[in-house]
């Protein structure tokens, strides 16, 4: 667990993602958190994604969003299918904010993308307001949470790896949170 900004980000407890979202100000930051969760996006990737990598020119969400190689940790382009829940949020986001199709999804100053620190600050404020500081959450929690949930639902690690963009199964396995209950369930169903 992350303590005083050290260690691994915790996986969201049931209901905590929605609680954090309800305590977060600004549609941009809320959309960033949703995008991070539903696409297993790293904070830096989400901050730098271009609108045209998510929407067509008419504002309709694409079937897959694209994290271009230049913004990924692995320097490999990664495409992620857009989940129906995320699609609904993206449709609403377009109607409310109508992001510039030629620019960044989350613009910052000038022609630059929003700073990762801005997203991190908004996330921390929402966690504090929700009284969840002791949980060890960070902007990496959405990524760990969706990957852990996929593993708990029985998806093959190779599928999760392709979704997450991890270079190796070894690095992916560090993300997946395994609890004592998971171990007991595994042996009881054997």
Image: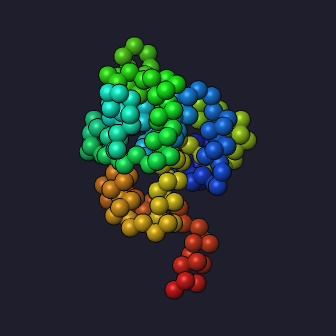
Q: Is residue 173 placed above or below 57 in the rendered structure?
A: below
Q: Is residue 64 left or right of residue 182?
A: left
Residue 57 is drawn in which quadrant?
A: top left
Tell me the residue at 30%/46% (across/down): 78
Residue reaching furthest to the bottom = 190
Judge whether residue 98 can be spotted in this image: yes
Q: Position of residue 155 (x, y in %)?
A: 42, 66
Judge whether residue 120 can be spotted in this image: no
Q: Position of residue 169 (x, y in %)?
A: 35, 62
Q: Is residue 174 left or right of residue 127?
A: left
Residue reaching furthest to the top = 110
User: Is 168 or 3 nearer to us in this picture?
Assistant: 168
Q: Position of residue 14 (x, y in %)?
A: 64, 55
Q: Is residue 170 placed above or below 38 in the rendered structure?
A: below
Q: Position of residue 140 (x, y in %)?
A: 50, 45
Tell me the residue at 42%/36% (across/down): 46
Q: Is residue 147 left or right of residue 181?
A: left
User: Is 57 or 172 nearer to us in this picture?
Assistant: 57
Q: Count the labels in the image.
A: 0
Tell me the residue at 49%/66% (across/down): 153
Tell me the residue at 64%/40% (across/down): 20
User: Is 94 or 3 nearer to us in this picture?
Assistant: 94
Instruction: Indicate the colouring scheme.
Output: rainbow
């Amino acid at each position: 667990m992350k303590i005083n900004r050290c260690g691994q980000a915790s996986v969201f407890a049931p209901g905590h993602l929605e609680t954090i979202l309800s305590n977060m100000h600004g549609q941009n930051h809320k959309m960033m958190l949703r995008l991070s969760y539903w696409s297993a996006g790293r904070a830096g990737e989400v901050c730098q994604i271009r609108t045209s990598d998510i929407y067509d020119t008419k504002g309709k969400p694409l079937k897959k969003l694209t994290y271009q190689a230049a913004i990924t940790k692995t320097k490999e382009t990664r495409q992620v299918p857009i989940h129906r829940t995320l699609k609904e949020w993206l449709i609403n986001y377009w109607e409310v904010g109508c992001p510039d199709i030629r620019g960044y999804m989350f613009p910052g100053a000038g022609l630059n993308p929003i700073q990762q620190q801005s997203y991190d600050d908004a996330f921390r404020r929402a966690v504090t307001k929700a009284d969840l500081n002791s949980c060890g959450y960070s902007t990496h929690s959405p990524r760990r949470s969706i990957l852990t949930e996929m593993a708990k639902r029985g998806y093959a690690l190779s599928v999760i790896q392709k979704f997450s963009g991890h270079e190796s199964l070894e690095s992916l396995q560090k993300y997946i949170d395994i609890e004592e209950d998971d171990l007991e369930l595994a042996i009881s169903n054997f």
